[in-house]
Image (spheres, grey):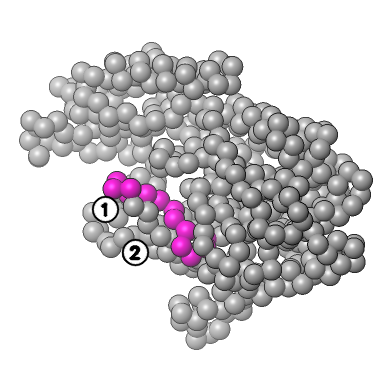
Amino acid sequence: MRILHTSDWHLGRPLADADRTEDYRRFLDWLLGLMAAESVNVLVLAGDVFDTAMPPVSAQRLYFDFLRRASELPEFWGTIVAAGNHDSLPMLQATGGVLGFVRATVSGATAEEEAVLVRDREGRVRLGVAAVPYLREGDVRMSGFYDDEADRARRWGEGVARHYREAAELLDARLRAADAADAPRIATAHLFVTGSRTSRVDDGRSIPAVFAGALRNVSAEVFGSCWDYVALGHIHHAQSVSGPVLMRYPGSPLMLSFDDLDRRHEVILADFPNGRGVPQLRSVDVPQPRWIGRIRASADGLEAAFAEARRAAERSAERFGAEALEPIASLECERASEAGEAFLIRVRAMAARYGLRLGPVRRIRGQREDADDALEDDLRSITPEEVFEQVLEEAGLSSEKGEIMRALFKEARQEAEMEASSGN
């Protein structure tokens, strides 16, 4: 049996205001080709199918069309979808009855709904999956009036452990009843696991995930030792995590932001040659359908830099045998003789001539310019995350405190997006 593990698609997410529907279409075509070539039996999608709770129609069409086409592969048994924090679980579940016709199952909100048996095309149970969606604190623990942060962390970890223990017990019972006690058992988890890494710094070292509130991390021990594999999602940087069982983050398959430029983008193939036991893992790098990069140049060197970005976009498209998509780049440019808005307009016009879309643009001082002559960033051309990072840098916080503040900022942004999408 061969399982393909992926996560964090974020269908519908733009970058630098560019619609990326075609990026995702090419990725999903590539993924179907891989599944066919590798004779994949089961696809496990560990959260964040969509980027928002109310995704655009174009993103939903890609998703449902992919599920239909996957179900038509001759050796394919089914897709297991676990909702992530960006997804709306009710929205994913709304089509549950119809999804049965394309061999797809969406995670539920209780252990009874999460325990899934996967059958082959002859009807034999071959795999047990605890399809656990993104868990919020209120889902797994009760707050005490006098709880401090240590109490919250302890109760959170205990609640997650209890949730997975109940799912495992129910799954075991269902597998025994189906006369499939020797079938492999895997679990999905869309959360931060202690020891995982969320970002990289310039010297190549990784910064461990330290989170607070609903985004706190959990120990790998909360999953117990009953699983053959834990399919992780939520972190966009591909990596393994040490624990009592084998577990891995595949990361986001496509670059979702300029922070992703130095990250691996992959999917995981997990082979179970003899039923239960530790699977054999193999990572497959995902080719990027669009060139996304960071350009740093002097004002005099912009023309050459933009031309090279265009050539890179054409090389990127060759592996798909398709027309090059509009390249996207962030830009750091030494200040030219022009100043202010006029210079920015000229830079963007020059990029447009090369079919290049610019995201954030920062104008930096040349070596011979006076320190007092530095130009401020154009706030209309940078993202809220970049503004927040600049504030953190100026605050001079330690790396640990900085990671906590990033988590709180991300949590606030996600809650605001959820409220906006629901009309609240």
Say which of marks 1 and 2 sits in front: 2
Q: Left or right? Give the position of 15 relative to 341.
A: right
x and y percentages locating residue 388 in the rendered image: 35, 51
The reply to whether discs 1 and 2 touch (Cβ–Cβ < 8 Å) is no
Q: Residues within 10 Å of mark 2 (few under 14, many from 20)?
A: some
What residue would you read off at disc 2? 400
Q: Secondary structure at mark 1?
A: helix
Q: Residue at x 86, y 55 (%)?
A: 125
What residue would you read off at disc 1? 393
x and y percentages locating residue 34 in the rendered image: 67, 33
Counting the numbered discs, the total is 2
Of callouts 1 and 2, the N-terminal one = 1
x and y percentages locating residue 329 in the rendered image: 39, 29
Q: Residue at x 20, y 18 (%)?
A: 300
Residue 197 covered by magenta stretch: yes
As drawn, which residue projects farthest toward the front?
Answer: 274
As drawn, which residue projects farthest toward the right?
Answer: 122
Q: Nearer the viewer, residue 218 or 41?
A: 41
- For the residues labelled 1 and 2, the Cα–Cα distance comes to 13 Å
As drawn, which residue projects farthest toward the top?
Answer: 353
Q: Nearer the viewer, residue 419 or 52?
A: 52
Q: Residue at x 30, y 55 (%)?
A: 392
Q: Which residues are magenta?
A: 192-204
x and y percentages locating residue 237 in the rendered image: 48, 48
Residue 337 covered by magenta stretch: no
Q: Is residue 133 visible?
A: no
Q: Residues within 10 Å of mark 1 (few under 14, many from 20)?
A: few
Q: Secondary structure at mark 2?
A: helix
Question: At label 1, which amino acid type do we have?
Answer: Glu
